[in-house]
Image (cartoon, rainbow, N blue to C red):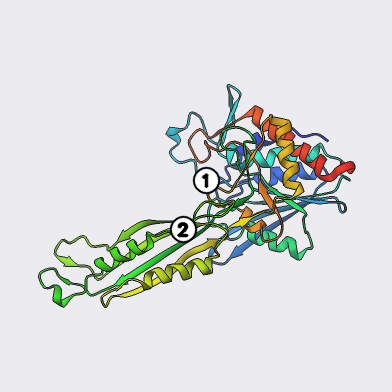
Amino acid sequence: MSLDALDLLKRLIACPSVTPEAAGALDVLEAALSGIGFVVTRLRFEGDGSYPVDNLFAVRGTGGRRLLFAGHTDVVPPGDLANWTSDPFTPREADGMLYGRGAADMKSGVAAFVAAAAAIPADAGTVMLAITNDEEADAINGTAKLMAWAEAQQQHFDFALVGEPSSAALLGDSIKIGRRGSLSGLITVAGTQGHVAYPERANNPMPALARIVSALDSQIDTGTEHFPASNLEVTSIDVGNPTGNVIPAAGTIKFNIRYNDLWTPETLADWVRGRIATVDAKGATVTFNITGAPARSFLSPLSDDVAILGTVISDVTGRKPEFSTGGGTSDARFIAQHGPVVECGLVGPSMHKADEHISIADLNGLTEIYRAFMVRFFGEAA
């Protein structure tokens, strides 16, 4: 049975699957996968302070090499509909492009891989898909728990592809072999409130806040072979004080660090504490807490499988891809804990924007990249 990637993508876009509502997207995917011989399991995870999420795990084959494809069907909200040329959940073709929310990020990757899998013999090897509807928001009841479940079911893999839009400007010009980690923090400096005319009766937290910001504005490292230098950005300094003649009682600093493979969240938190310790708080109380769930950095080994993928991309596009670790985080960080993974997908500049779109030719090209990679990955059996 053959599948058309464009037709499948249109049906997925037509599902308004804004996180965490699957809105029929997983139903569409289950039907397509079942039709080409996959055994599909639907899983719903909840708890841990987040909303319930529907997920899908599919397997075809029992022997040979084992390839995992991972991705997500959830999308960000469309925002003000007045900024869209047409309904974001009604797929629209124009001038060789396909428009709709999720076209780039990343229903296209899912559609391309399923269509490619349909073109590969069912007995070539073992193909698995791990699809969540919770990548764009909390990412708590999605891929992390899905991969833990898969490991408990002995569903291991030799190599994994994530279909995120990894290309920068042209299809296949870049694949992600790793990602920086992300750690967010909140520092609170508590002083003593008082009247500005009587500073001796108060303890203004603002000077300590300023000194801490200056202490954080220092080099963390100089980078590694595949990663740039880690970087800390202060995103907010706030005392919540609307009155001009009152010394505030306390103030906060919010920051985020994007870090390389020299660090873990634990060692980086110790670095932050060390920088804070260099500051004389002048009697104010300073506390530091990590906010949210840190994302760990990862780097996949430059294996034969990565080389094969690079060769296939060169054959299909005529361009040798760059190996990149740039950008933000993705669900690949959860998969990397279980095996080697890279991200390979379409061009991404329109993602999360109004009139999100992709080139239909690129969609067909990505489908061919996935198909040709599977042929090489599985060898003679394919």
Could you tell me which quadrant the N terminus lies in? top right
Percent x, y of residue 360: 64, 28
The residue type indicated by label 1 comes to: Val
- Element at label 1: loop
Which label number is shown at residue 257? Answer: 2
Percent x, y of residue 35: 80, 41
**Taking 27 as reference, is 180 above or below it?**
below
Percent x, y of residue 332: 63, 53
Determine which quarter of the picture holds residue 6: top right
Which residue is at a point 61% across and 46% down the rendered structure image?
23
First in sequence: mark 2 vs mark 1: 1
Could you tell me which quadrant the C terminus lies in? top right
The residue type indicated by label 2 comes to: Ile
Q: Which residue is mark 1?
A: 76
Residue 25 left/right relative to 223: right
**Taking 330 as reference, is 114 above or below it?**
above
Residue 269 left/right relative to 130: left
Percent x, y of residue 70: 68, 50
Which residue is at a point 60% across and 60% down the rendered structure image?
141
Which residue is at a point 15% across and 77% down the rendered structure image?
201
Q: Is residue 6 visible?
A: no
Residue 204 left/right relative to 369: left
Which residue is at a point 83% across and 39% down the rendered structure image?
120
Q: Residues within 10 Å of mark 1 (few under 14, many from 20)?
A: some
Q: CA distance from mark 2 to mark 1?
A: 23 Å
Determine which quarter of the picture holds residue 368: top right
- Element at label 2: strand
Determine which quarter of the picture holds residue 185: bottom left
**Taking 39 as reference, is 98 above or below it?**
above
